[in-house]
């Protein structure tokens, strides 16, 4: 086995890994970029990009169906082949990563295909070759769909998000196991293409990481659209007779043509050689604020970014981690870590959140005040009409008079969130926010009402 010297090895080329490779290579470092699947990772091929194309198509169908109430008549005939073709041709190049791979080499890095595995301090083995990194190794191995140990499930041809976004036709009926962001986004999008959809969630409510008001809002919207929502249930087993899935939950059995498992994500930490550097593989890797892995043999030179550090599984957060790791490796100054990151669930209504929830604030012992307003009753919500459901919620630390968390749900919930994200990050005083002029009639004017 031959050995190659370099400055840095980056294992895993999801968005954060790809950005880090380009940043370091353009700074003059010799970088080896390792990827076992497609350069670009989950987001552009099976996640963010194709799913938002799918959601956009479904939302257009929903808007067209609202014409009869608001402005005239329309005949809506869904054609799933159009969005399937757009995902294949425009988003994924038919799941070909040539363009992304060329970006890596154009930046001056060396691209190596294969499964990267640590083989000691600052050393990575890939496809029979050994790479020794003078500065160190960055792990960005990401996550894969978690498959719960439900009796019978593993013996069935169920979908994960990957199969759901590679499908070329919509099933007549679909059961979704999991009421988190991925499951809810895909459930609603398929329902808008006339798929009969049922969502099963074992937690007491769907969208459990967000505020309970958001869960209640989405449950009502989904049920009004004919999507079955069953939370707080126990799934006993899954069967498939060759044509139909049957999911048994106590005395109830739900049947559908297809089953989508969207029950969370699992870190890819198996078989990447963590034992060779004395790091114990748990659910996530513990890192310091410069993204350096803590523990292990203590010699340094090992960083981790993205989903595997357990600080949030979002593309924008992985990119943020990449920049912090780059600065640490290059010896550039680091600002304080931003743990008030925004997040958006792209259902209709969109549900955006930033900072901590009301319950998390109370668990921290903060003196909490809450502001809550109904977006549909706002000036913009009123003129918008059908499809105007939403809310603004602000969680305030009353002792400091700043917002520590906020929710923005509505037709443009993710966009309206931007003002709240800055307010939380910059700790803008309530006096300033209350003395701000909010344009009329906009959805974001509802922030003033919540305050």
Image (spheres, rainbow, N blue to C red):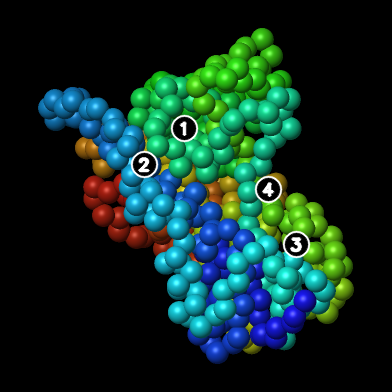
Q: Secondary structure at mark 2?
A: helix
Residue under numbered circle 1: 187
Residue under numbered circle 3: 272
Residue in the picture at 68% in, 28% down: 155
Residue under numbered circle 2: 84
Camera-side mark, 2 or 1: 2
Instruction: Please report contact status of discs 3 and 1: CB closer than 8 Å, yes or no.
Output: no
Camera-side mark, 3 or 1: 3
Work out whether mark 3 precedes mark 2 in sequence or the reverse, and give the earlier one: 2
Along the horizontal axis of the image, is 15 left or right of 154?
left
- Outermost residue to the bottom: 28
Work out whether mark 3 precedes mark 1 in sequence or the reverse, and give the earlier one: 1
- Between marks 4 and 3, how big is the CA–CA gap? 14 Å
Q: Is residue 399 visible?
A: no
Along the horizontal axis of the image, is 438 left or right of 139?
left
User: For the residue carrying disc 1, how many other residues have a C-alpha within 10 Å: few (<14), some (14-19), or many (20+)?
Assistant: many
Q: Is residue 366 above or below residue 36?
A: above
Is 243 or 144 nearer to us in this picture?
243
Camera-side mark, 4 or 3: 3
User: For the residue carrying disc 4, how many other residues have a C-alpha within 10 Å: few (<14), some (14-19), or many (20+)?
Assistant: some
Is 132 or 420 nearer to us in this picture?
132
Instruction: Please report contact status of discs 2 and 1: CB closer than 8 Å, yes or no.
Output: no
Residue in the picture at 60% in, 71% down: 112
Residue in the picture at 74% in, 82% down: 3
Work out whether mark 4 precedes mark 3 in sequence or the reverse, and give the earlier one: 4
Q: Is residue 315 visible?
A: yes
Residue in the picture at 23% in, 32% down: 64
Q: Secondary structure at mark 1?
A: helix
Q: Secondary structure at mark 4?
A: strand
Residue under numbered circle 4: 266
- Between marks 1 and 4, how big is the CA–CA gap? 21 Å
- Between marks 3 and 2, how big is the CA–CA gap? 34 Å
């Amino acid at each position: 086995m031959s050995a190659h010297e370099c400055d840095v090895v980056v294992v895993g080329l999801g968005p954060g890994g790809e950005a880090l490779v380009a940043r370091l290579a353009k700074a003059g470092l010799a970088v080896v970029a390792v990827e076992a699947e497609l350069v670009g990772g989950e987001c552009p091929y099976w996640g963010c990009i194709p799913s938002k194309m799918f959601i956009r198509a479904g939302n257009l169908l929903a808007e067209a169906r609202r014409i009869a109430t608001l402005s005239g008549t329309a005949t809506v005939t869904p054609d799933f082949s159009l969005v399937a073709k757009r995902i294949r041709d425009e988003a994924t190049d038919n799941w070909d990563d040539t363009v992304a791979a060329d970006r890596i080499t154009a930046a001056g890095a060396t691209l190596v295909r294969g499964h990267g595995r640590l083989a000691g301090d600052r050393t990575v083995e890939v496809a029979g070759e050994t790479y020794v990194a003078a500065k160190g190794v960055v792990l960005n191995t990401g996550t894969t769909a978690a498959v719960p140990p439900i009796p019978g499930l593993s013996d069935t041809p169920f979908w994960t998000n990957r199969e759901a976004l590679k499908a070329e036709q919509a099933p007549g009926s679909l059961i979704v196991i999991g009421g988190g962001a991925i499951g809810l986004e895909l459930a609603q999008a398929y329902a808008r293409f006339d798929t009969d959809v049922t969502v099963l969630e074992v937690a007491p409510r769907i969208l459990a990481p967000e505020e309970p008001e958001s869960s209640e809002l989405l449950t009502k919207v989904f049920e009004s659209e004919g999507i079955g929502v069953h939370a707080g249930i126990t799934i006993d087993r899954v069967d498939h007779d060759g044509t139909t899935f049957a999911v048994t939950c106590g005395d109830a059995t739900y049947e559908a043509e297809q089953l989508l498992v969207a029950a969370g994500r699992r870190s890819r930490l198996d078989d990447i050689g963590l034992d060779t550097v004395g790091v114990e593989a748990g659910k996530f890797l513990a890192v310091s604020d410069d993204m350096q892995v803590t523990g292990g043999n203590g010699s340094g030179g090992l960083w981790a970014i993205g989903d595997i550090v357990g600080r949030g599984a979002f593309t924008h957060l992985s990119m943020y981690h990449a920049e912090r790791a780059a600065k640490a490796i290059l010896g550039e100054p680091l600002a304080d870590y931003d743990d008030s990151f925004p997040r958006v669930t792209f259902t209709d209504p969109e549900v955006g959140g930033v900072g901590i929830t009301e319950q998390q604030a109370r668990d921290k012992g903060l003196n909490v005040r809450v502001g809550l307003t109904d977006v549909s009753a706002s000036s913009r919500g009123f003129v918008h009409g059908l499809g105007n459901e939403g809310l603004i919620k602000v969680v305030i630390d009353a002792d400091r008079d700043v917002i520590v968390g906020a929710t923005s749900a509505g037709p443009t919930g993710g966009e309206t969130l931007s003002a709240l994200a800055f307010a939380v990050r910059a700790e803008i005083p309530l006096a300033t926010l209350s003395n701000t002029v909010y344009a009329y009639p906009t959805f974001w004017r509802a922030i003033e009402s919540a305050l």
